[in-house]
Amino acid sequence: MFHKALWMRNWKQGKYVILLFWFITLYALPYKYYVEAQNTVHYFQMNIKDSYYFYYFGGSDPIIFPALILIALATLLIGWERNNQSVDFLWAMPFKRSHLFLSKWLFGMAHIVSALSVSWFLMYIVYKTTIHAEYQSFTPFHLYFAYTIMTLIAVYTLALFIGTITGNIVSQGALSYILMILPIYIFQLVFPFFALHVDLSEKEYNNVYGKSSMYIENTSTLAPLTHFKINYDYHPRKEATKDEYGDLHAGPAYHHIPSAWTILSPAIYILICLPLGAYLYARSPNEHNGKILLYQRLHVYFSICTSICFGLLGSEIFTNGSKSIPLHYMYVIGFSILTYVILQRMLKHKLSLYAK
């Protein structure tokens, strides 16, 4: 898995995506951090009497595009090989198939750790040499980068694993993205539908929704960063307030750093998807290359789960806030059946232009 030929092949396939990942990461973190410092200095110079220091950093915002680029990298390293049939040549090389998969994982992980480590170092230099040092502590950013490294490795590992059960780049990329964000949004579809069957006041509804959604979101690969916030607000007339998490903010530093336990979620994804992905990659049936899924046994589970999700989505969109239970069931059943029928036809056909 450390053979130079494998690393050179991975680099040849994904070099442009890797370079884009480095560029976006450096732009979204150290460069924008530097720009914020320059804008603040300019603001102070232009508004001497009313100027005050303000800085906000949303944890998941800067890594969304890098995460999408990593999904693209995974689809190139696995899905594209299935599309152009080069996987046959690759498997003919004197390497274990599991080692081929692990080399792709190590290749991506090395660039994730390297890009974020460089960004971490550059941000610290920016912090020490700009106005940020006068108002901020860099400690929250140390935790942020530790969380981000685990999160992006989990996203990349999940995308590679999806590539071992899908037959083309379209299905691999789409399923990887959906599974990355599904725990964050699935509760927004499921809870309102089931709440129709229970008599809840608005206060009870919001209370149950807020607590339950937090637990569901913590099963996502993005869990450590979803609610990670760094906020400095030195407004002289700002009063103490409570944020959405119930924390009282009586000073200029308004951070919300999720518990270290949230790292368990991406860690579990890595521990499950990495060995399972290596196992399935070594046993992938090439005769189904080009299809949405490589394994026939997964078709029924995939069809049922996808149909239910689209049924709930259709109900949420087209009922327009109606409380009518029969109307919701009509849309859920209708969209579920329609989705199921379409999927049954799509699962039988190859979508790849190059598949045999």
Image (cartoon, rainbow, N blue to C red):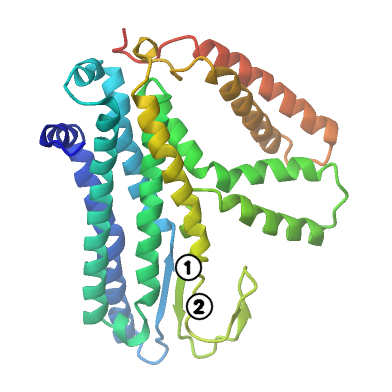
Please state which amino acid type lies under the numbered disc 1. Answer: Lys
Residue furthest out toward the top: 356
Q: Could you say where residue 140 lies in the image, as x and y percent from the top left?
A: 40, 73
Q: Could you say where residue 194 lies in the image, as x and y percent from the top left?
A: 78, 41
Instruction: Determine which quarter of the picture holds residue 278.
Output: top left
State the residue at coordinates (41%, 45%). 270
Towards the viewer: 352 or 277: 277
- Please, is residue 35 above or below residue 49 in the view? above
Q: Could you say where residue 152 lies in the image, as x and y percent from the top left?
A: 37, 50
State the residue at coordinates (35%, 56%). 149
Q: Could you say where residue 81 lies in the image, as x and y percent from the top left?
A: 26, 22
Q: Which residue is mark 1?
A: 229
- Please, is residue 250 above or below residue 85 in the view? below
Residue 227 visible at all? no
* In the displayed structure image, the side of residue 332 where residue 266 appears, left or right: left
Residues at badges 1 and 2 in contact (C-beta under 8 Å)?
yes
Instruction: Determine which quarter of the picture holds residue 164.
Output: top left
Towards the viewer: 350 or 49: 350
Figure disc tally: 2
State the residue at coordinates (28%, 81%). 41
Q: Which residue is mark 2?
A: 254
Instruction: Determine which quarter of the picture holds residue 42.
Output: bottom left
State the residue at coordinates (31%, 59%). 28
Please state which amino acid type lies under the numbered disc 2. Answer: Tyr
* In the displayed structure image, the side of residue 268 where residue 127 appears, left or right: left
Residue 132 visible at all? yes
Determine whether the residue tagged by mark 2 lies in a helix, strand or loop.
loop
Q: Earlier in the sequence, mark 1 or mark 2?
A: 1
